[in-house]
């Protein structure tokens, strides 16, 4: 069980969760900032890996970066999101912005399968976008998936509804799976 307050029954409406503080739906702005920070961290790790592997890329390069190397970025992001959410309920960005992902039904940390589904729903479209060509527009679908949380009263996007999760404000630190 997570250390956040969670109702005995699955919340159905906004009033079922606290208005503010621990256990309230994570504000959309904090969620967006956490996502951008996580993308930046993975992008920098990907750049380092590309450098270490000696892969040529950039403006002066005559050949575009290999497909496998381009696909490495979204794969790294999907794995990062899956592992950290399943293990801690938080990525680095979520930890710094005090957000925790929990199961919608009972407030426990998500299972590895739920975490993988949560990462793959937008991640599949990122994979398509990194293939390039006409698939590049698939990135817009990933963004729309994240933005669907804005229209929901509990800020649950499509990726959260399909994975049985919700992001809550969590002023405490990392939680470990028991």
Image: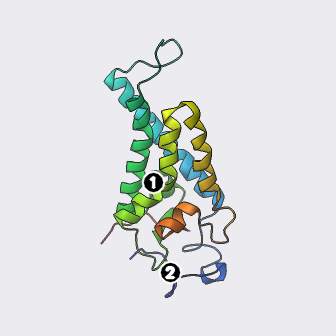
- Where is residue 135? Give x, y as percent: 55, 37
Q: Secondary structure at mark 2?
A: loop
Q: Is residue 160 left or right of residue 29?
A: left
Q: Is residue 160 left or right of residue 79?
A: right
Q: Are marks 1 and 2 in contact (CB under 8 Å)?
A: no
Residue for point 45% across, 52% down: 92
Q: Quadrant of residue 139?
A: top right
Q: Which residue is mark 1?
A: 120
Location of residue 89 in the rendering, given as x and y in whole percent from the top left corner: 42, 63
Between circles 1 and 2, the one closer to the viewer is 1
x then y, percent, for residue 15: 66, 82
What is the residue that sits farthest to the right in this orientation?
A: 151
Q: Is residue 76 left or right of residue 7?
A: left
Left or right: 62 as drawn, with respect to 76: right
Looking at the image, residue 60 lies above or below residue 85: above
Q: Position of residue 44 (x, y in %)?
A: 45, 34
Q: Secondary structure at mark 1?
A: helix
Which residue corresponds to the image point at 53% horizontal and 61% vertical from the top-left? 159
The label shown at residue 6 is 2
Q: Nearer the viewer, residue 125 or 81?
A: 125
Q: Is residue 59 above or below residue 152?
A: above
Q: Nearer the viewer, residue 78 or 168?
A: 78
Residue 37 visible in the shown view? yes
| Of the pair 176 and 80, the residue shown nearer to us | 80
């Amino acid at each position: 069980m997570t250390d956040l307050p969670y109702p005995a029954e699955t919340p159905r409406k906004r009033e079922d969760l606290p208005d503010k503080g621990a256990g309230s739906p994570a504000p959309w702005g904090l969620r967006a900032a956490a996502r951008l920070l996580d993308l930046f961290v993975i992008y920098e790790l990907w750049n380092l890996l590309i450098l270490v592997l000696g892969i040529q890329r950039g403006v002066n390069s005559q050949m575009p970066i290999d497909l496998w190397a381009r696909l490495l970025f979204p794969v790294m992001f999907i794995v990062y999101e899956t592992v950290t959410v399943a293990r801690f309920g938080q990525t680095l960005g979520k930890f710094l912005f005090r957000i925790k992902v929990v199961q919608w039904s009972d407030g426990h940390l998500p299972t590895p399968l739920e975490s993988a589904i949560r990462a793959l729903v937008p991640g599949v479209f990122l994979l398509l976008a990194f293939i390039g060509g006409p698939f590049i527009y698939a990135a817009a679908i990933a963004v729309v998936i994240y933005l669907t949380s804005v229209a929901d009263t509990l800020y649950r996007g499509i990726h959260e509804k399909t994975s049985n999760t919700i992001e809550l404000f969590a002023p405490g630190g990392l939680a470990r799976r028991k």
